[in-house]
Image (cartoon, grey):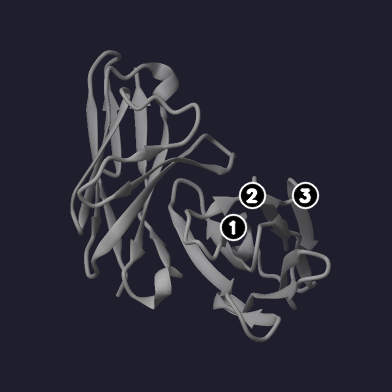
Amino acid sequence: AQSVAQPEDQVNVAEGNPLTVKCTYSVSGNPYLFWYVQYPNRGLQFLLKYITGDNLVKGSYGFEAEFNKSQTSFHLKKPSALVSDSALYFCAVRDQAGTALIFGKGTTLSVSS
Amino acid sequence: GAVVSQHPSWVICKSGTSVKIECRSLDFQATTMFWYRQFPKQSLMLMATSNEGSKATYEQGVEKDKFLINHASLTLSTLTVTSAHPEDSSFYICSARSLAGGYNEQFFGPGTRLTVL
């Protein structure tokens, strides 16, 4: 069975500092990995995905994520955080069989000015 | 492209009534649609997977008679919450998978906030 773990309920960073939101996964076979962001009372906004190819994936709003197969991780990163990045972030995974995305519990990112 | 809409965006109903939520893929055909449920500050929990023209597959613990899903066409799926109760109050999000792109893409609707009084 597929699963996703986001070990941190909340991440706090100061504006301008780099941020990392952690994600580890478990799937049988090769994973399809995704990051989404959700603002209050809103749907999900797609940030980036890893399917194959380069381990470093660049996405929307300056975010990037690094796929690490040996550590089964797909951490979300940004070199310089903005206050407007404060939101709820979800990591998601599915296997090649094309099943539904399975989501982690979410990490609240709080960026202070 | 790849826009998924939901209607209504929010609904308030009395306990015991039924509520229908529509999910439409506006500019692509979706053979598969997924329904998720999200409680405040919690993750999205997959409720069911629906394939066009066939019965939905429900996740363990989801009552199929309470959450009726119909996927009548390649662009429309509906979720009906029957005899709603306050514990059904939640944020319901649908997602549609495109025929294109090797089934890699799953697009999400904006969600429907259901409040049962």
Residue furthest to the left in view is: B73
Q: Secondary structure at mark 2?
A: loop
Vertical position of residue B26 compared to residue A6: above or below: below
- The answer to whether marks 2 and 3 sit on the same chain is yes
Residue under pointer 1: A92
Q: Which residue is mark 3?
A: A8
**Quick one: B5 or A85, which is closer to the camera?**
B5
**Residue B33 horizontal/vertical position (percent):** 33, 52
The chain containing the residue under callout 3 comes to A
Q: CA distance from mark 2 to mark 3?
A: 11 Å
> Depth check: A112 or A60 in front?
A60
Mark 2–mark 1 CB contact (< 8 Å)? yes
Give the amino acid at mark 3: Glu
Q: CA distance from mark 1 to mark 3?
A: 15 Å
- Measured along the vertical axis of the image, is residue B107 above or below residue A9? below
- Residue kind at label 1, given as amino acid type: Ala
Q: Which residue is mark 2?
A: A104
Q: Chain of mark 1?
A: A
Query: N-terminal of the two: label 2 or label 3?
Result: 3
Q: Secondary structure at mark 3?
A: loop
Residue at horizontal 76%, vertical 64%?
Answer: A73
User: Which numbered marker is on residue A58?
Assistant: none
Q: Quadrant of the C terminus of chain A?
A: bottom right
Position of A31 with respect to B1 (left or right) is: right
**Sequence-earlier tag: 2 or 1:** 1
At x 58%, y 43%, the residue is B43
**Which chain is indicated by disc 2?**
A
Whole-angstrom CA distance, mark 2 to mark 1, is 6 Å
